[in-house]
Image (cartoon, rainbow, N blue to C red):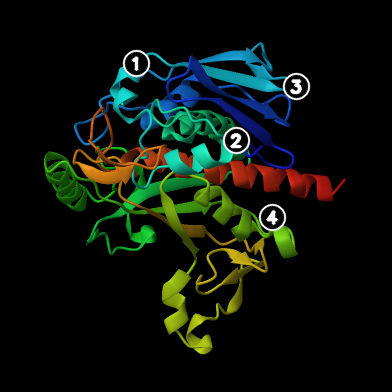
Amino acid sequence: MGSTYGKIFNISTFGESHGKAIGVVIDGCPAGVDFDEAFIQSELDKRKPGQSRITTQRKEGDSFQVLSGVFEGKTTGTPLALVIFNEDQRSKDYSHIADKYRPSHADYTYDVKYGIRDYRGGGRSSARETAARVAAGAVAKLVLQNIGVEIKAYVKQVGRLKLEKDYAALNLDLRFENAVRCPDPEMAQKMFDYIDDIRKQGDSIGGVISCVATGVPAGWGEPAFDKLHAEMGKAMLSINAVKGFEYGSGFDGTALLGSEHNDPFTLEEGKVKTKSNHAGGILGGISSGEDIYFNVAFKPTATIMRDQESVNSSGESVVVSGKGRHDPCVLPRAVPIVEAMTALVLVDFYLRSRADKL
């Protein structure tokens, strides 16, 4: 329950933070897609831990193995299984919280729901699971690249440090040129120094990731409950530490008049376009052909290197002490996760749109 996503391009992830391995089974991937292992590995490398001093120092290569679904370099159309073996588990780092509930973690809710919890790094609730999503999202990107769809996410805000430039004014290809994943070099350095200072204080900080998908044709999406933006919101809110999602003009759009917010239609080279894009590329839950753009809000990392008041499973008051290896800010490693989940949503609607025409 709860580990499967997608109607046609369907994924199921498995594994725990300190288990033997994590992985994903993809069902519904079209046959004949060139399976670019180097590209998939490069996507995983963007998410893996230990990349700088502002990320967790857990050392995982995140190298994947293909168990099924690929033959002679192409997908076969049968279930595609990918596995990533864990290499640097330190379960002893979590023995001190075996019966304690860490503030703002899922320890308590997992215990209530299941009557048992894997306290080693949060088990299934750990963001370690998202590596499997990134692997699946990389496969989805391979499908989407064939039809000209590109997805680019970047760090827009860390704490109160905010990049005010519109995405169209940025060179998004620079986003992976620094440890923060911000395409503006000057702001990236400010963000890095701020996160590093927070780390030294034993604390954490949150922020906002922006994402834009270009090349999405008009017509993807479903009416009523399967609206494109509703599925995108669900996908983003399924990512660890996400607290909010807005697309297009988002909450800022509530301050505009209808005459200011409406996007007038026009014809360009025989194609219907809009003069502005407050709608964020989606009308009535269906893609309009304009850029799809949105923001995703992330809370500060729950684990901090400070003592915190809590209770244990026996209902006794305890102190939870920070220990282990953790990200002082999840944003840099969350950028490829946002891109992956975007790709999984879009590839599913792409395949649905093909089915509509059969």
| Quarter-of-image position of residue 274 | bottom right
Name the outermost residue toward the right. Answer: 358
Amino acid type of the residue that numbered disc 3 sits on in the rendered structure = Thr
Rendered position, 219 above or below 23: below
Q: Position of residue 21 (x, y in %)?
A: 50, 17
25 or 95, which lies in front?
Answer: 95
Q: Earlier in the sequence, mark 4 or mark 2?
A: 2
In which quarter of the view is residue 331 placed?
top left
Given contact means CB atoms under 8 Å apart, are the residues at marks 4 and 1 in contact? no
Q: Which residue is mark 2?
A: 140
Q: Are marks 1 and 2 in contact (CB under 8 Å)?
A: no
Residue at 43 percent across and 27 percent down: it is: 44
**Amino acid type, mark 2:** Ala
Q: Which residue is mark 3?
A: 78
Disc 1 marks which amino acid? Answer: Asp
Disc 3, SS: loop
Give the residue pinned by disc 4: 220
Q: Where residue 297 appears, x then y in whole percent?
A: 39, 56
Local crowd size for mark 4, using a 10 Å CA cut-off: few (<14), some (14–19), many (≥20):
many
Q: CA distance from mark 2 to mark 3?
A: 15 Å
Secondary-structure class at tag 4: loop
Q: Say if residue 302 shows up in the picture.
A: no
The disc, 1 or 2, on the residue closer to the chain's N-terminal end is: 1
